[in-house]
Amino acid sequence: DQQVKQNSPSLSVQEGRISILNCDYTNSMFDYFLWYKKYPAEGPTFLISISSIKDKNEDGRFTVFLNKSAKHLSLHIVPSQPGDSAVYFCAAVDSGGGADGLTFGKGTHLIIQP
Amino acid sequence: KAGVTQTPRYLIKTRGQQVTLSCSPISGHRSVSWYQQTPGQGLQFLFEYFSETQRNKGNFPGRFSGRQFSNSRSEMNVSTLELGDSALYLCASSLTDRAYNEQFFGPGTRLTVL
């Protein structure tokens, strides 16, 4: 059973607009969440993270929102740029002692249209 | 500083064979984690090594094993290969264990099992 779900396999957004990528999780023990970006033929690169004690974390054009009661997080990219076209993975971890490393979603392919 | 390197980048094997993949972490990093990426399952955690000790293990059969050397370089081995083992194998390194937001991924080894 997938513990981290990204229900949109792909998302197309116009350049300059806001991109919103969503992620849901089922394991209530997850307390740390991360977003990774992956270009073809490269490994994922860390983008932004959020601890469960916060509901928002911002880094430049990237903001992650966490809704613990809904077990939902989202990544906002404003404004979207052509270089943002990539696959975005949501990941979660039980930092307190879980033995499973990072649990990833299946990814959302973001396409920024000029 | 050189990034995480993985060798080989591409590999073709046949069913029943065994394979060894190598990962050299960033200099000074002591933690190495391995992940399997497939189109159907996304990125799945295999195991994590820290200071030559396996710290965490994902839900994979015993055919998947790994080790870490005193210089932090890591290898993973898959024995009795199956068609379903075809995947991109990624390793990630970090300074300490569980430093999830400071994990740096290599470009991966693309394994094809025929």
Image: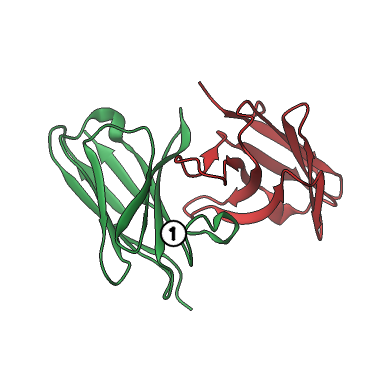
Q: Nearer the viewer, residue B2 or A24?
A: A24
Q: Is B19 placed above or below B113 here? A: below
Q: Nearer the viewer, residue A6 or B53?
A: B53
Q: Is A95 placed above or below A73 here? A: below
Q: On what subunit does the disc labeled 1 rest?
A: B
Q: Identify the residue at the far bottom of this view.
A: B1
Left or right of residue B39: residue B64? left
Residue displayed at 48% across by 67% down? B95
Q: Nearer the viewer, residue A94 or A13?
A: A94
Q: Secondary structure at mark 1?
A: loop
Residue displayed at 73% across by 53% down? A82
Q: Is B111 placed above or below A59 here? A: above
Residue A94 in picture, x, y percent from top left: 57, 41
Left or right of residue A88: residue B109? left
Residue B71 in picture, x, y percent from top left: 29, 72
What hue represents chain A? red
Residue B62 appearing in the image: yes
Label 1 packing within 10 angstroms: few (<14), some (14-19), many (20+): many
Residue B9 appearing in the image: no
What hue represents chain B? green
Left or right of residue A104: residue B69? left
Left or right of residue A94: residue A74? right
User: Which residue, given by chain and number where applicable, does mark 1 sit on?
Assistant: B106
Amino acid carrying label 1: it is Gly
